[in-house]
């Protein structure tokens, strides 16, 4: 059983991750922090509140997170997820408001109150987690674990040819967090590129008739429109990628992915490669370049059929 702090930038695949978690009896969302990324942190918090309303968890607090990255101007990916972050169809705003503390303060406060008990599921840029670590250097010991959707080890990037979006939106934060000594599993594009939800898959989810299924299919229509011109030819049809739900599934069941351990660094200076996630994969024990940097687990393989079946069940059953 996992008690989860969700750090997120909803975001359509973030929304699907909420729905997935809501359907799992062994997952309890304890609190949510929003972060800039797909949309602004303020809009991400509004969307998190709407999603909690949808899943009937109006008791879960939402804290607004960092409004901008640590060391670069804000850039939001609103073409991917629509101006409102939820494909323009998510319905009316929540009557609830975010809490007064920041997402980083909330993270630190809860981790101190429940040492070693809480899991952090990070589905966006790592700005809040970095700020939390700067507020509380013991944070890596206070959290049970961190699972982060982000990075790309042996595949191309998505937001740039070399960088994955969550790493690229705040490379300094990602580099700090990956080197901070958290028990951390990275769910990179290497595995999330296999989470392809094509139109027949969405149609069959919607046929289930569950209200969440209709919501998920409607919200995802925009995402499918975004992805399809890029990927239709490669994939043989229209569809979209469910990145964030895989991180949620791997948190609850680590056996769904296989991982290698690496000291992962984030490129901070490259003119074309800023935000790339790098590991020394030469395997030369005598000349390892990581200089004592802690290792993290990087998922390199996934049982994709099983993962997609779990998402389907969660949305349609
Ligand atoms: C990640 O970037 C965002 O667009 C998605 O929500 C996901 O977290 C994929 O690169
Ligand atoms: Ca996300």
Image (cartoon, helix red, strand yellow):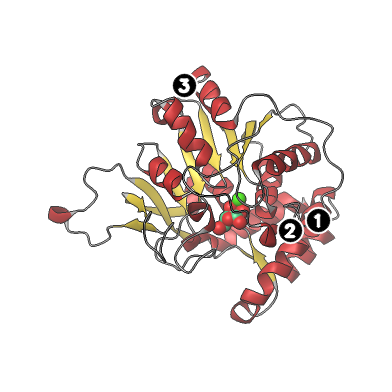
Residue 98 is situated, as x and y percent measured from the top left of the image, at: 72, 30
Counting residues from the start of the chain, the first of labels 1 and 3 encountered is: 1
Residue 179 is situated, as x and y percent measured from the top left of the image, at: 35, 42
Residue under numbered circle 1:
88
Classify 48 as above or below 227: above
* Mark 1 sits near ligand 1, with its Cβ under 8 Å away: no
Q: Is residue 98 left or right of residue 273?
A: right
What distance separates the C-alpha of mark 2 from that of mark 1?
6 Å
Could you say which disc has been placed on residue 185 in the image? Answer: none
Q: Looking at the image, do the residues carrying marks 2 and 3 touch, with CB atoms under 8 Å apart?
A: no
* Near-viewer residue (100 or 294): 100
**Disc 1 vs disc 3: which is toward the camera?**
1
Instruction: Check disc 1: other Cα within 10 Å, few if <14, some if 14-19, many if 20+.
Output: some
* Callout 2 secondary element: loop
Could you say which disc has been placed on residue 115 in the image? Answer: 3
Residue under numbered circle 2:
82
Instruction: Check disc 3: other Cα within 10 Å, few if <14, some if 14-19, many if 20+.
Output: few
For residue 245, say whether it is visible.
no
Q: Quadrant of residue 285?
A: bottom left
Residue drawn at (69%, 69%), measured in percent from left and top?
Answer: 239
For residue 80, say whether it is visible.
yes
* Callout 3 secondary element: loop
């Amino acid at each position: 059983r996992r008690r989860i702090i969700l750090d997120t930038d909803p975001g359509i695949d973030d929304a699907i991750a909420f729905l997935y978690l809501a359907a799992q009896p062994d997952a309890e969302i304890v609190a949510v922090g929003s972060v800039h990324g797909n949309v602004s942190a303020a809009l991400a918090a509004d969307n998190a509140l709407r999603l909690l309303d949808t899943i009937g968890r109006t008791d879960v607090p939402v804290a607004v997170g960092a409004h901008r990255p640590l060391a670069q101007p804000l850039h939001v990916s609103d073409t991917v997820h629509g101006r409102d972050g939820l494909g323009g169809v998510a319905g009316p705003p929540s009557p609830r408001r975010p809490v007064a503390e920041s997402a980083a303060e909330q993270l630190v406060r809860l981790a101190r109150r429940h040492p070693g008990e809480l899991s952090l599921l990070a589905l966006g840029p790592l700005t809040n987690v970095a700020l939390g670590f700067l507020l509380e250097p013991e944070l890596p010991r206070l959290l049970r674990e961190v699972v982060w959707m982000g990075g790309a080890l042996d595949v191309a990037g998505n937001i740039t040819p070399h960088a994955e979006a969550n790493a690229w939106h705040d490379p300094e934060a990602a580099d700090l967090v990956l080197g901070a000594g958290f028990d951390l599993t990275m769910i990179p594009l290497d595995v999330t590129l296999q989470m392809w939800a094509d139109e027949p898959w969405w149609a069959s989810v919607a046929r289930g008739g569950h209200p969440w299924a209709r919501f998920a299919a409607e919200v995802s229509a925009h995402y499918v429109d975004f992805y399809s011109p890029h990927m239709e030819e490669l994939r043989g049809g229209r569809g979209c990628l469910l990145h964030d739900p895989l991180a949620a599934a791997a948190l609850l069941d680590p056996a769904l992915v296989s991982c290698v351990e690496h000291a992962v660094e984030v490129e901070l200076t490259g003119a074309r490669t800023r935000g790339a996630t790098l590991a020394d994969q030469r395997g030369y024990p005598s000349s390892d370049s990581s200089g004592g940097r802690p290792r993290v687990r990087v998922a390199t393989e996934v049982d994709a059929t099983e993962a997609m079946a779990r998402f389907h069940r969660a949305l349609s059953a």
